[in-house]
Image: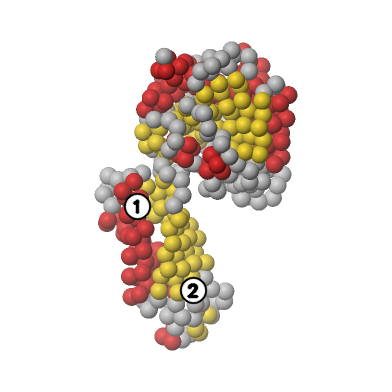
């Protein structure tokens, strides 16, 4: 049975209302100005010390307790460039933009947790970070450049997770989410008449063969027990039905966990793309841009998170989630400070609230909001207690 504190129960209706307001007004990476202003106003009204403009549009609220460890709780604010397909009363009012990954819920939970922590008499300090630009746009790096991680001993974060049922919390030590690198391939051919392909070097045919051949890197060069994904997400080439273009551009993503495998992937993909293109009288130009590293939960902090989760939902509802090839820039913080990223179950198939993240039909069961909020509070308290004891 879920255990909610009186202050979270008292703020629950406001938390849901805030989530719905934010859902109606989604903002893309580094443009979260309305969201940030709303967050800052709510926290300042609650008496918190607030710093705005962190990493561009980020906000940090500080709860300064007695001298002790400093814990950072992180929530992301940005939406996605997706047209929402929803009949909900709180559906996005902005064409072509929606909160399709639960970030509106993360903000609402974190605002409420910050308000509830004010009167807790903490033995350490808590910073609640509302981060811009999580969706692959360098938000965590921008926050770090602005000093948002200075003096922090532990980092905690949550993600509403539609792969787990509402009422559960997923905690796992070690690898949780994959490294995310970007792939761009330009196939250079020689354009010509669609009816005279022998006088051209067709980059569309070459691109098609390259897309298929790239899958053999994972299927035939990577150990079958080592996770890896190569996905081509866009193909752009040509403008007319009867014209062979000069070039085709492919973009995609590479997902891995193992550092050595990650380092080897650019060479492997480049070799295959160039070889296939050359065999078809074309030339492949390959660029791999490193993104976020894998999310690796520190075992000690994961145990702290597990204890916090048990406090909220009970032992039987704390689960060990499967690692996912999705990525997250929480990993950037974990390279500098030990931390743990936790999944808060948010799906409810009976109510049709089980669509995948980044879907135009994504939504979640709002019963997850007080659970995630209570977990953030418990995690901060458990981390302060544990790290304080460790420092002795």
Residue appearing at x 46%, y 80% in the figure: 190
Q: Residue 262, percent across and down?
A: 35, 50
Find disc 1 in the rendering and name its residue. 263
Position in image of residue 293 (x %, y %): 42, 44
Name which residue lies at 67% across and 29% down: 50
Nearest to the observer: residue 302 or residue 145: 145
> In the figure, residue 226 lies in which quadrant?
top left
Name the front one of labels 2 and 1. Answer: 1
Is there any visible trace of residue 281 in the rendered image?
yes
User: Which residue occupies 37% across, 58% down?
Assistant: 266
Instruction: Locate residue 342, reporting x and y percent.
Output: 47, 30
Report crowding for label 2: few under 14, some 14 to 19, many 20 or more residues within 10 A (C-alpha).
many
Q: Which mark is residue 247?
A: 2
Q: For residue 129, which quarter of the picture?
A: top right
In the picture, measured across the screen, residue 332 lies left or right of residue 21, that is left
Q: Earlier in the sequence, mark 2 or mark 1?
A: 2
Q: Nearer the viewer, residue 2 or 353?
A: 2
**41 to the left or right of 137:** right
């Amino acid at each position: 049975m879920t255990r909610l504190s009186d202050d979270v129960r008292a703020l629950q209706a406001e938390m849901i209302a805030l989530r719905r307001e934010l859902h109606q007004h989604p903002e893309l990476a580094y443009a979260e100005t309305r969201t940030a202003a709303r967050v800052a106003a709510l926290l300042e009204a609650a008496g918190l010390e607030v710093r705005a403009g962190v990493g561009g549009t980020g906000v940090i609220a500080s709860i300064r307790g007695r001298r002790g460890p400093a814990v950072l709780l992180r929530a992301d604010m940005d939406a996605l460039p997706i047209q929402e397909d929803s009949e909900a009363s709180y559906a996005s009012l902005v064409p072509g933009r929606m909160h399709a990954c639960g970030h509106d819920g993360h903000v609402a939970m974190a605002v409420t947790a910050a308000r509830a922590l004010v009167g807790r008499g903490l033995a350490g300090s808590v910073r609640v970070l509302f981060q811009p630009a999580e969706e692959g746009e360098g938000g965590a790096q921008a926050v770090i450049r602005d000093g948002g991680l200075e003096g922090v001993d532990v980092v905690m974060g949550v993600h509403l997770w539609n792969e787990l049922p509402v009422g559960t919390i997923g905690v796992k030590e070690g690898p949780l989410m994959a490294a995310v690198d970007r792939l761009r391939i330009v196939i250079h051919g020689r354009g010509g008449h669609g009816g005279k392909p022998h006088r051209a070097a067709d980059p569309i045919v070459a691109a098609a063969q390259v897309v298929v051949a790239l899958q053999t890197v994972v299927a035939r060069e990577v150990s079958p027990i080592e996770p890896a994904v190569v996905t081509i997400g866009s193909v752009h080439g040509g403008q007319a039905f009867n014209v062979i273009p000069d070039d085709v551009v492919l973009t995609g993503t590479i997902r891995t966990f193992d550092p050595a495998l990650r380092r080897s992937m650019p060479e492997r993909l480049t070799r295959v793309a160039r070889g296939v293109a050359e065999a078809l009288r074309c030339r492949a130009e390959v660029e791999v841009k490193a993104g976020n590293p894998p999310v690796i939960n520190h075992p000690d902090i994961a145990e702290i998170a597990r204890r916090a989760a048990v406090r909220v939902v009970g032992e039987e509802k704390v689960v060990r989630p499967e690692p996912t090839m999705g990525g997250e820039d929480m990993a950037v913080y974990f390279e500098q400070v030990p931390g743990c990223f936790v999944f808060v179950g948010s799906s409810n198939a009976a109510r049709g609230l089980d669509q995948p993240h980044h879907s135009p039909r994504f939504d979640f069961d709002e019963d997850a909001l007080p659970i995630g909020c209570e977990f953030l509070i418990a995690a901060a308290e458990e981390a302060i207690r544990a790290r304080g004891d460790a420092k002795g």
